[in-house]
Image: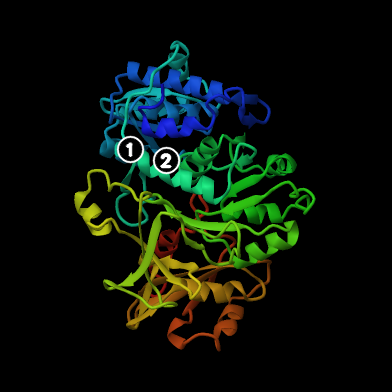
Amino acid sequence: MYDQNHLISKLRAASVGHDNRRFAEIPGAGDISYHDLFAGAERMAAALVGLGVTPGDRVAVQVEKTIEAIQLYLGTVMAGGVFLPLNTAYTTPEVAYFLGDAGPRVVVCDPSREAAIAEIAGAARVMTLDAGGQGTLRAAADAETGFAPVARAADDLAAILYTSGTTGRSKGAMLSHANLASNSETLRDYWRFTPDDVLIHALPIFHTHGLFVATNVALLAGASVVFLAGFDADRILEAMPRATALMGVPTFYTRLLNDPRLTPERAANMRLFISGSAPLLVDTHRDWLARTDHTILERYGMTETNMSTSNPYEGERRAGTVGFALPGVEARIRHQGQEVPVGEIGVLEVRGSNVFRGYWQMPEKTAEELLPDGWFITGDLAKVDAEGYVTIVGRAKDLVITGGFNVYPKEIESLIDDLPGVLESAVIGVPHADFGEAVVAVVVPREEGFEAGSVTEGLRDRLAKFKQPKRVILLPELPRNTMGKVQKKALREAYADLFA
């Protein structure tokens, strides 16, 4: 009965005839089968239709990570709706912008926020779902018996995900059924996922990584997951001997490396550790191999494209790179409209069935970044080596122009991170009366007693003078978002008056 709904038919196919197969092990709460997962999703779909959801309507969701939230995602797509997940850290004023822009038919939130959300929801129905999977939406779904998914074609919208809004207003990336299905099928095959896999799922599900990579790939493979509410070193290490894969952000790996329980023996059953959503330090890549006998596979993607590149499953997974364009995805690096030679830096552009349909209600912005021939301008600065490995150098907006010279922060950060006593760094540009922008290095030391002069001295003979930081700032940690990305915008704002 799922055949007419493009994405749902794909996600359900691997488990047809294997309904009793476990989809998720939920520590402390038992297991859920594929049958129960999809039966619950059907009831969610029926409840949403009862609330007035029709094909194309948006369903905005700001709830904690539960199986019921996964069923809500699947149920929204079954009902022909467009799933709109929102970061649980967003404040009420931030949510007000998203609701005003997207105009959802239904908003689902935690019961503790129901009153505040109701004030900004406009004509939308407000329903609740708590961290235990209970609430008014769950009650409405429990009163339903089943649902036949609404017919939706490959080009119909399945989701809108808002970008993080580091420059200007957040943009709603429109993702079709085909965008999600095709990319997840590619990843399933490229990363060799099968029904025998057990994926440790510790990522949030308001983001592409946890929702459309981890969840969809597991479903498409008919695999099972160890379903964790968030990063929990104890539970991850406990699950590792019976699991086969982990998808994480770099912070997962750095935190696990600090745990003495991480050993080759504990990781012996694992076949794949994947990292993304933020750059993985070369040191972390090497330390993980030394500690576990496994090489982390780093990949690259964006809200607008899902995954575009990956280090190989077989072959060298090269530290500091994001590998090659995935099958079915084209990648090129251009500067001022021309492709750059091997080894030179330009802006990465990608094209393929993974690329989104445009920005919700922003035709001008869509036209700027999504070219008529299908190429998407990612805004990421990158280079490709002679063997085809892609290295992300930074965001174009993070480029520092000082005294008329271009400075690429990644180059300086790599040198600083290699200095003794440095844990990590972020290089930014801040206003400067003489140079336009000044290069500033924000450094996190490994231990107390580290002096900023060590960085200045360590770079003195290794960089051209215009690239050398005019100021080094020491911090206990770098500001990050929930997916572990360093928030350079926050740093630029904090130190905007440094040379005033």
Measured as percent of width and height from the top left, residue 308 is found at 43, 55
Q: What residue sits 40% from the left and 72% below the top?
A: 429
> Label 2, on which residue?
181
Report crowding for label 1: few under 14, some 14 to 19, many 20 or more residues within 10 A (C-alpha): some
Measured as percent of width and height from the top left, residue 358 is found at 27, 48
Q: Earlier in the sequence, mark 1 or mark 2?
A: 1
Is 221 located above or below residue 363 in the figure?
above
> Label 1, on which residue?
154
Quadrant that contains the N terminus? top left
Pick whichever, 27 or 191, lies toward us. 191
Asked if one can make out residue 221 in the rendered structure from this viewpoint, the answer is yes
Q: Specify whether 210 is left or right of 33.
A: left
Asked if one can make out residue 208 in the rendered structure from this viewpoint, the answer is no
The answer to whether the residues at label 1 and label 2 have Cβ atoms under 8 Å apart is yes
Q: What residue sits 67% from the left and 50% below the top?
A: 271
SS state under label 1: loop
Q: What residue sits 36% from the left and 45% below the top?
A: 162
Amino acid type of disc 2? Ala
Amino acid type of disc 1? Ala
Measured as percent of width and height from the top left, residue 188 is found at 52, 45
SS state under label 2: helix
